[in-house]
Image: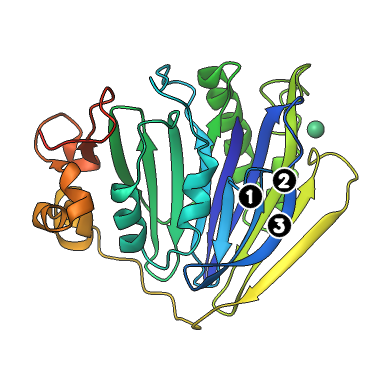
Amino acid sequence: MCTVSFIPKDQGFYLAMNRDEKRSRSIALPPRIVTVAGCRAIFPREPNGGTWIAVNDAGLCLALINWHRIQRNPADEIASRGQVTANLAGAASSNDIADAMMGMTLHNLRPFRLIAIVPGERVMTEWRWDLELLTARRHEWERKHWFSSGFDETTAELERSCICDAAHEEKSRDSLASLRLLHRSHAPERGPFSICMHRADAVTVSYTEVVVSTECVVMRYKNGAPCSSNSVSESSLARRVAVSFRPAPRPIDNARRYSSNFRTGNSRHVATRPRQRTCRPLRGRSRGQAARHAYRFDRHQKHPTID
Ligand SMILES: [Zn+2]
């Protein structure tokens, strides 16, 4: 249960995330700077070490949300999805993420969507795991929102999309102030569908804001509902390498994009890596194939297999 907003800027981007959880869930620990795979990263964490959001000194940002619309559950013991984000926090490129995702054991994770933003490449990818397929969907480098809700995900998406569209009409729509206002919004009314969510059994438990520029990355974190007066902590890192943002890539069809720019689209690449022999891209098999790339997993097996 969450809302994630992405706003591109000339020299970077803003990302904001409301985390909605059961009131009974244990309180998360505030963000800390840690070293992961040689990268310095900032992220809050659950007591078990997992996290739902991270940014690192390469400017790479990850946000993980549940996917309630998919009703399937793992057959075996369920592991925490928070480990996915924590394990990827040291990634420096889209290829790093793709390699790690394809080598990861997913069969015991509930459905999720992982948004991965790589500013140096101007690439935004949404990884989706539905317990049968792992898919990667590339989004345009433009304002975007994601919503999830365990209460009524479809209605929550509709209601919250309307609120975001209305905010988009405002003059100051791309400012940080506007983003904060949006994430503390109680429209259409304070309740299960408002972006700052309040239910009897669940609530928005934290607000996290990420600002990435060519020089630094900043994470601000409020423990508690965005509408609360709780204090905000701030952590920052200098970018490892100050980079100039590339011009937006020329529009190309998705099939070409995957074959030319997206290394996971190369089946030979998959087949040559031992851990990745267990999955392969499914190309040209279904409607929508050009918009996404799928890797088939057998949900009844411990490890995915080549079919
Ligand atoms: Zn509120």
For the N terminus, which image quadrant? top right
Compare residues 202 and 132 and report the one nearer the observer: 132
Task: Name the residue: 54% across, 24% down.
Answer: 158
Q: Which residue is mark 1?
A: 16
Foreground tag (2 vs 3): 3
Q: Which residue is mark 3?
A: 31
Total marks drawn? 3
What is the CA distance from the residue labelled 1 to the residue labelled 3?
14 Å
Q: Which mark is residue 267?
A: none
Foreground tag (1 vs 3): 3
Amino acid type, residue under disc 2 in the picture: Tyr
Task: Name the residue: 35% across, 41% down.
Answer: 105
**Residue 252 seen:** no
Note whether 214 is above or below 265 in the view shown. Answer: below
Tell me the SS state at disc 1: strand
Tag 2 or tag 1, which sits nearer the N-term? 1
* In the displayed structure image, the side of residue 57 where residue 265 appears, left or right: left
Residue 13 horizontal/vertical position (percent): 55, 62
Q: Which mark is residue 207?
A: 2
Q: Are marks 1 and 2 in contact (CB under 8 Å)?
A: yes
Q: Quadrant of residue 91?
A: bottom left
* In the displayed structure image, the side of residue 226 where residue 57 appears, left or right: left
What is the CA distance from the residue labelled 2 to the residue labelled 3?
12 Å
Compare residues 143 and 4 and report the one nearer the observer: 4
Residue 57 horizontal/vertical position (percent): 55, 72
Note whether 222 is above or below 235 in the view shown. Answer: above
**In the displayed image of the protein, which residue is found farthest to the right?**
229
